[in-house]
Image: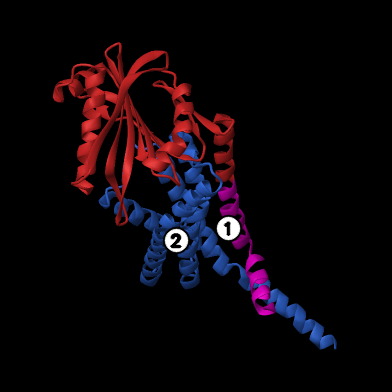
Chain colours: A red, B blue
């Protein structure tokens, strides 16, 4: 033991090694310090505030989140943001299309209005779950309207029985899709996941929904 | 005018091996360090911070500088400094640059070379800088102690003589 300590002391006494240790530890600490600064600059209670030229939304700081900008000049541009807790199977997705992307999306899928968009996404979700279980059953709950960011959005709520496979077991999926068109721009919000997880995180979803500003 | 002396063949071979070591160390630690970083953020319940992509990219590059690029260069430099004794000031930059070049080429062929990603410039800059600084520190660490330890031994010998 004393040999190890003696060797370690001798190694650390070499200035380049000491500089290396200080630089390595220092930059790791500086990096985490910077992360802490980013965190504190955007923290609103237990929620982080994502604010950019497309939207403003608050989400729990322990949820995994990322955003991206799909599309180009010809296909139109968009903005998507993805949120999901790390310990539950639930996903919230936000999508904003510009005029060109909205038109192309609607034309490509023969959609006419916000309701047809929500129905189309529900159908797409069901087809996706059929890939993991051909016996998955679509259970319609309701359609309605809800106010999001001072705009009236159409929503459709449904479940897919045995629509999600985890390990060898099948679980029910619960989903809600919202959409609205404002100034020829399409907005979509999806919140779906394993039935139990969906129910337990629904309160968080409502908080996020009420924080959205366009 | 001083005449520029080119390093001998074996020095170049050891420098190239040092570059290889630098790359291997980075390749092995890179995924591990990023995984650990993600686990730390999840553990502290702040994983949401990654949504601030540009700022987070800079923070991640700073962490990777100390956790991946600097050690990569350091170990490459240790080997080169152990095998090569002359012209260290010039030769020690090479393992870092070689390690950086191999990593960049591999990243390109693996399809992970994305100039549009927010941390592209940071990563390149921090990787190159970390490799070169680490390489010099490793190389000089290997050659530094010779004088200091010799002094220590002389001191002990003197004490023994007095007895």
Q: Nearer the viewer, mark 1 or mark 2?
A: 1
In this view, the residue in front, B12 or A128, is A128
Residue at x 55%, y 68% (from the top left corner)? B142
The residue to which callout 2 is attached is B91
Q: Chain of mark 1?
A: A
Report, in whole angstroms, how far the alpha carbon at label 1 lies from the one at label 2: 19 Å
Residue at x 62%, y 73% (from the top left corner)? B146
The residue to which callout 1 is attached is A20
Q: Which residues are magenta?
A: A1-29
Label 2: element kind: helix
Quadrant (top left, top right, bottom left, bottom right) of the N terminus of chain A: bottom right
Residue at x 76%, y 78% (from the top left corner)? B155
Residue at x 44%, y 22% (from the top left corner)? A212
Q: Are discs 1 and 2 both within one chain?
A: no
| Circles 1, 2 touching at the beta carbon (< 8 Å) | no
Q: Is residue A26 magenta?
A: yes
Residue A93 place in picture, x, y as percent: 35, 32
In this view, the residue in front, A72 or B17, is A72
Q: Is residue A20 magenta?
A: yes
């Amino acid at each position: 033991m004393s040999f190890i300590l003696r060797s370690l002391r001798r190694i650390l006494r070499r200035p380049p090694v000491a500089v290396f240790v200080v630089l390595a530890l220092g930059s790791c600490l500086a990096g985490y310090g910077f992360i802490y600064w980013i965190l504190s600059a955007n923290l609103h209670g237990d929620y982080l505030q994502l604010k950019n030229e497309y939207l403003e939304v608050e989400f729990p700081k322990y949820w995994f989140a990322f955003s991206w900008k799909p599309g180009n000049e010809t296909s139109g541009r968009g903005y998507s943001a993805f949120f999901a807790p790390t310990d539950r199977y639930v996903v919230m997705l936000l999508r904003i299309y510009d005029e060109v992307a909205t038109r192309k999306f609607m034309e490509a899928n023969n959609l006419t209005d916000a309701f047809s968009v929500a129905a189309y996404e529900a159908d797409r979700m069901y087809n996706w779950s059929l890939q993991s279980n051909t016996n998955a059953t679509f259970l319609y709950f309701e359609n309605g309207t809800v106010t999001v960011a001072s705009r009236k959005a159409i929503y459709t709520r449904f479940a897919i029985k045995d629509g999600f496979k985890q390990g060898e077991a099948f679980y029910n999926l619960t989903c809600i899709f919202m959409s609205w068109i404002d100034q020829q721009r399409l907005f979509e919000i999806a919140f779906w996941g394993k039935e139990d997880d969906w129910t337990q995180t629904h309160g968080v979803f409502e908080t996020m929904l009420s924080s959205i500003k366009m | 005018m001083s005449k520029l002396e080119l390093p001998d063949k074996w020095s170049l071979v050891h420098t190239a091996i040092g570059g290889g070591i630098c790359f291997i160390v980075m390749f092995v630690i890179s995924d591990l360090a990023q995984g650990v970083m993600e686990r730390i953020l999840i553990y502290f319940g702040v994983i949401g911070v990654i949504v601030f992509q540009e700022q987070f990219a800079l923070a991640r590059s700073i962490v990777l500088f100390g956790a991946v690029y600097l050690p990569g260069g350091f170990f490459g430099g240790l080997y080169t400094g152990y095998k090569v004794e002359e012209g260290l000031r010039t030769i020690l930059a090479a393992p870092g640059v070689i390690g950086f070049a191999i990593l960049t080429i591999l990243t390109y062929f693996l399809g992970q070379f994305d100039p549009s990603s927010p941390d592209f410039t940071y990563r390149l800059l921090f990787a190159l800088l970390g490799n070169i600084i680490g390489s010099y520190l490793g190389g000089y660490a290997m050659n530094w102690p010779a004088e200091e330890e010799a002094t220590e031994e002389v001191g002990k010998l003197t004490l023994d003589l007095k007895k």
